[in-house]
Amino acid sequence: MRHELRGHAPPREPEPFIGIPSGSLEGDLVSALMRRHEVAAERLIGWLRVAIGGCIFLSVIVASAVLSELTDASLDAFERNAWIASLGFLAIGAVSIVLAVPQRWHHAFAYLFMALDVGLVLGIACLAVGGRDLPGNALPSAPIVWAAPLVLAVGALRYDVKVQLCAIALLALGFIAIAVGLEHKLVMEPGAATMPAWPQLFSMPVNVMRFALILMAGGATAFGIVRSRRLLASAVKDAVGRASLSRFLPAEIAPRLAAGDVDLRRGRRQRAVIVFVDIRDSTGMAEGMDPERLSQFFTAFRTRILGCVRRHHGVVDKFIGDGALILFGVPDEDSDDTGRALTFAHDLVGIVEAWNATQEHPHPIRIGIGIHVGEVFCGIIGDEERMEFTVLGDAVNVASRLEQATKRYGEVVLASGAVVEGSSEREAWREIGREPLAGRKEPVTIYAPAASPARQGTELAHLGS
């Protein structure tokens, strides 16, 4: 394999990172999540209706028992309305639970059940006040009226602001219609001087304040729904953006870019250790394998490289055919970058030898590794539809030439003097040559491991990439 990465000047400065390739993808995901959530939410709301009905039922039993023990008074009308409310919520809840399955559910059912909840509250409120021949001012005295905020709170679980706004409007119009229909008075005056002043608490100004508070509670739930949907859309957008970036960029680079690392997006110069890995005689190996087995082989090879790179905290920039370009010190430099790169090379050689010992393949797998360190330009090139993280510079070309030179020298690993002399493993390497390498004028000191495997010069001199 021949690696040609020419040029030292940085590419044209790209536009700032926008996010993800398409704005429609996250919208579709949010819609899909909302569709799945709608059925689950309506089922939960159904169970909450059952719970509300059960609580009203128990409240009636307890209140009736206490009242009969303490007094001889009877609240038949109150009990009747409470039974209606209890049975109503239980019935609506049971039906909604039965329908709240993907095979039966339709979005229009959300409006239907919302209307039934509101209608039940308004109907019982009208019975509670009108049945006692009270004016519309007494509407707040009906206990069921205070189920309205509960209905709105439960409805917010749908995350559908349109349904919630409809519920608020129906409740508001219903309460106004009941108050007007029952001849709401401007001021409730005590009938005699000896009568208490509490009827004045149901005069219009006080009731308007109560009405406004209920509307504000409903508005708060609607605002909460809008905010939750926006947060969900933002989270989905971020997740889609990260996933889209991960398709093109190394796993160690994508999160930094998604987090808004502008320098990395525009590109920057920095010191990095470059490692090229290549399989020897991959063309000959491919001739003896069917396409499926060849695919499995390369997948296994890349998996081993990835595992070894991660153990030594490097970055696989890209896989190039039957080889790989690996970086140490990117995106953040470290004083031990060269040492980790050399240790990685030793470990990868051991991994390949252990793989050969399994005799999974008819021919031994041989690799070549070239290592160099120097200043490079690293950054993102391409647009939002297709972007790529890359490194450019003379150091990249030197590492590529060293990997190719392993065939001439009969070595598995070759490293430049800049790498070996800057590491703590100098004694474990021996100098084997000094040459400018192909296409360069400046000579490079070449090192090989002091304890190299048997030299492969005679065997590999004829092999191409």
Image (cartoon, helix red, strand yellow):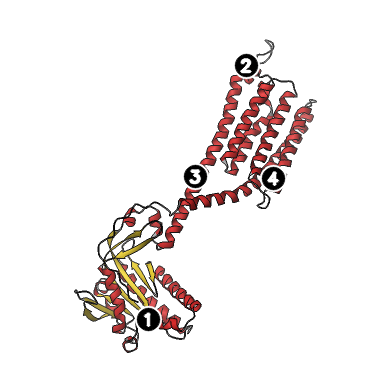
Q: Residue, x 59% and y 30% (percent of image)? A: 214
Q: Amino acid at mark 3?
A: Arg
Q: Quadrant of residue 7?
A: bottom left
Image marks 3 and 1: residues in contact by CB distance under 8 Å: no
Image quarter of the C terminus: bottom left
Residue indicated by mark 4: 96
Task: Please give left or right for residue 69 compared with residue 386 in the image.
Answer: right
Tag nearer the camera, 4 or 2: 4
SS label for mark 2 = loop
Vertical placement of 204 versus 218: above or below?
above
Q: Residue, x 65% and y 27% (percent of image)? A: 175
How far, Cα to Cα, is label 1 from label 4?
67 Å
Task: Please give left or right for residue 103 compared with residue 328 in the image.
Answer: right
Q: Amino acid at mark 4?
A: Ser
Q: Amino acid at mark 1?
A: Arg
Q: Quadrant of residue 283?
A: bottom left
Q: Nearer the viewer, residue 416 or 34?
A: 34
How far, Cα to Cα, is label 2 from label 3?
43 Å
SS label for mark 1 = loop
Residue indicated by mark 2: 186
Q: Is residue 401 visible?
A: yes
Residue indicated by mark 1: 280
Q: Earlier in the sequence, mark 3 or mark 1?
A: 3
Q: Amino acid at mark 2?
A: Leu
How far, Cα to Cα, is label 4 from label 2?
41 Å
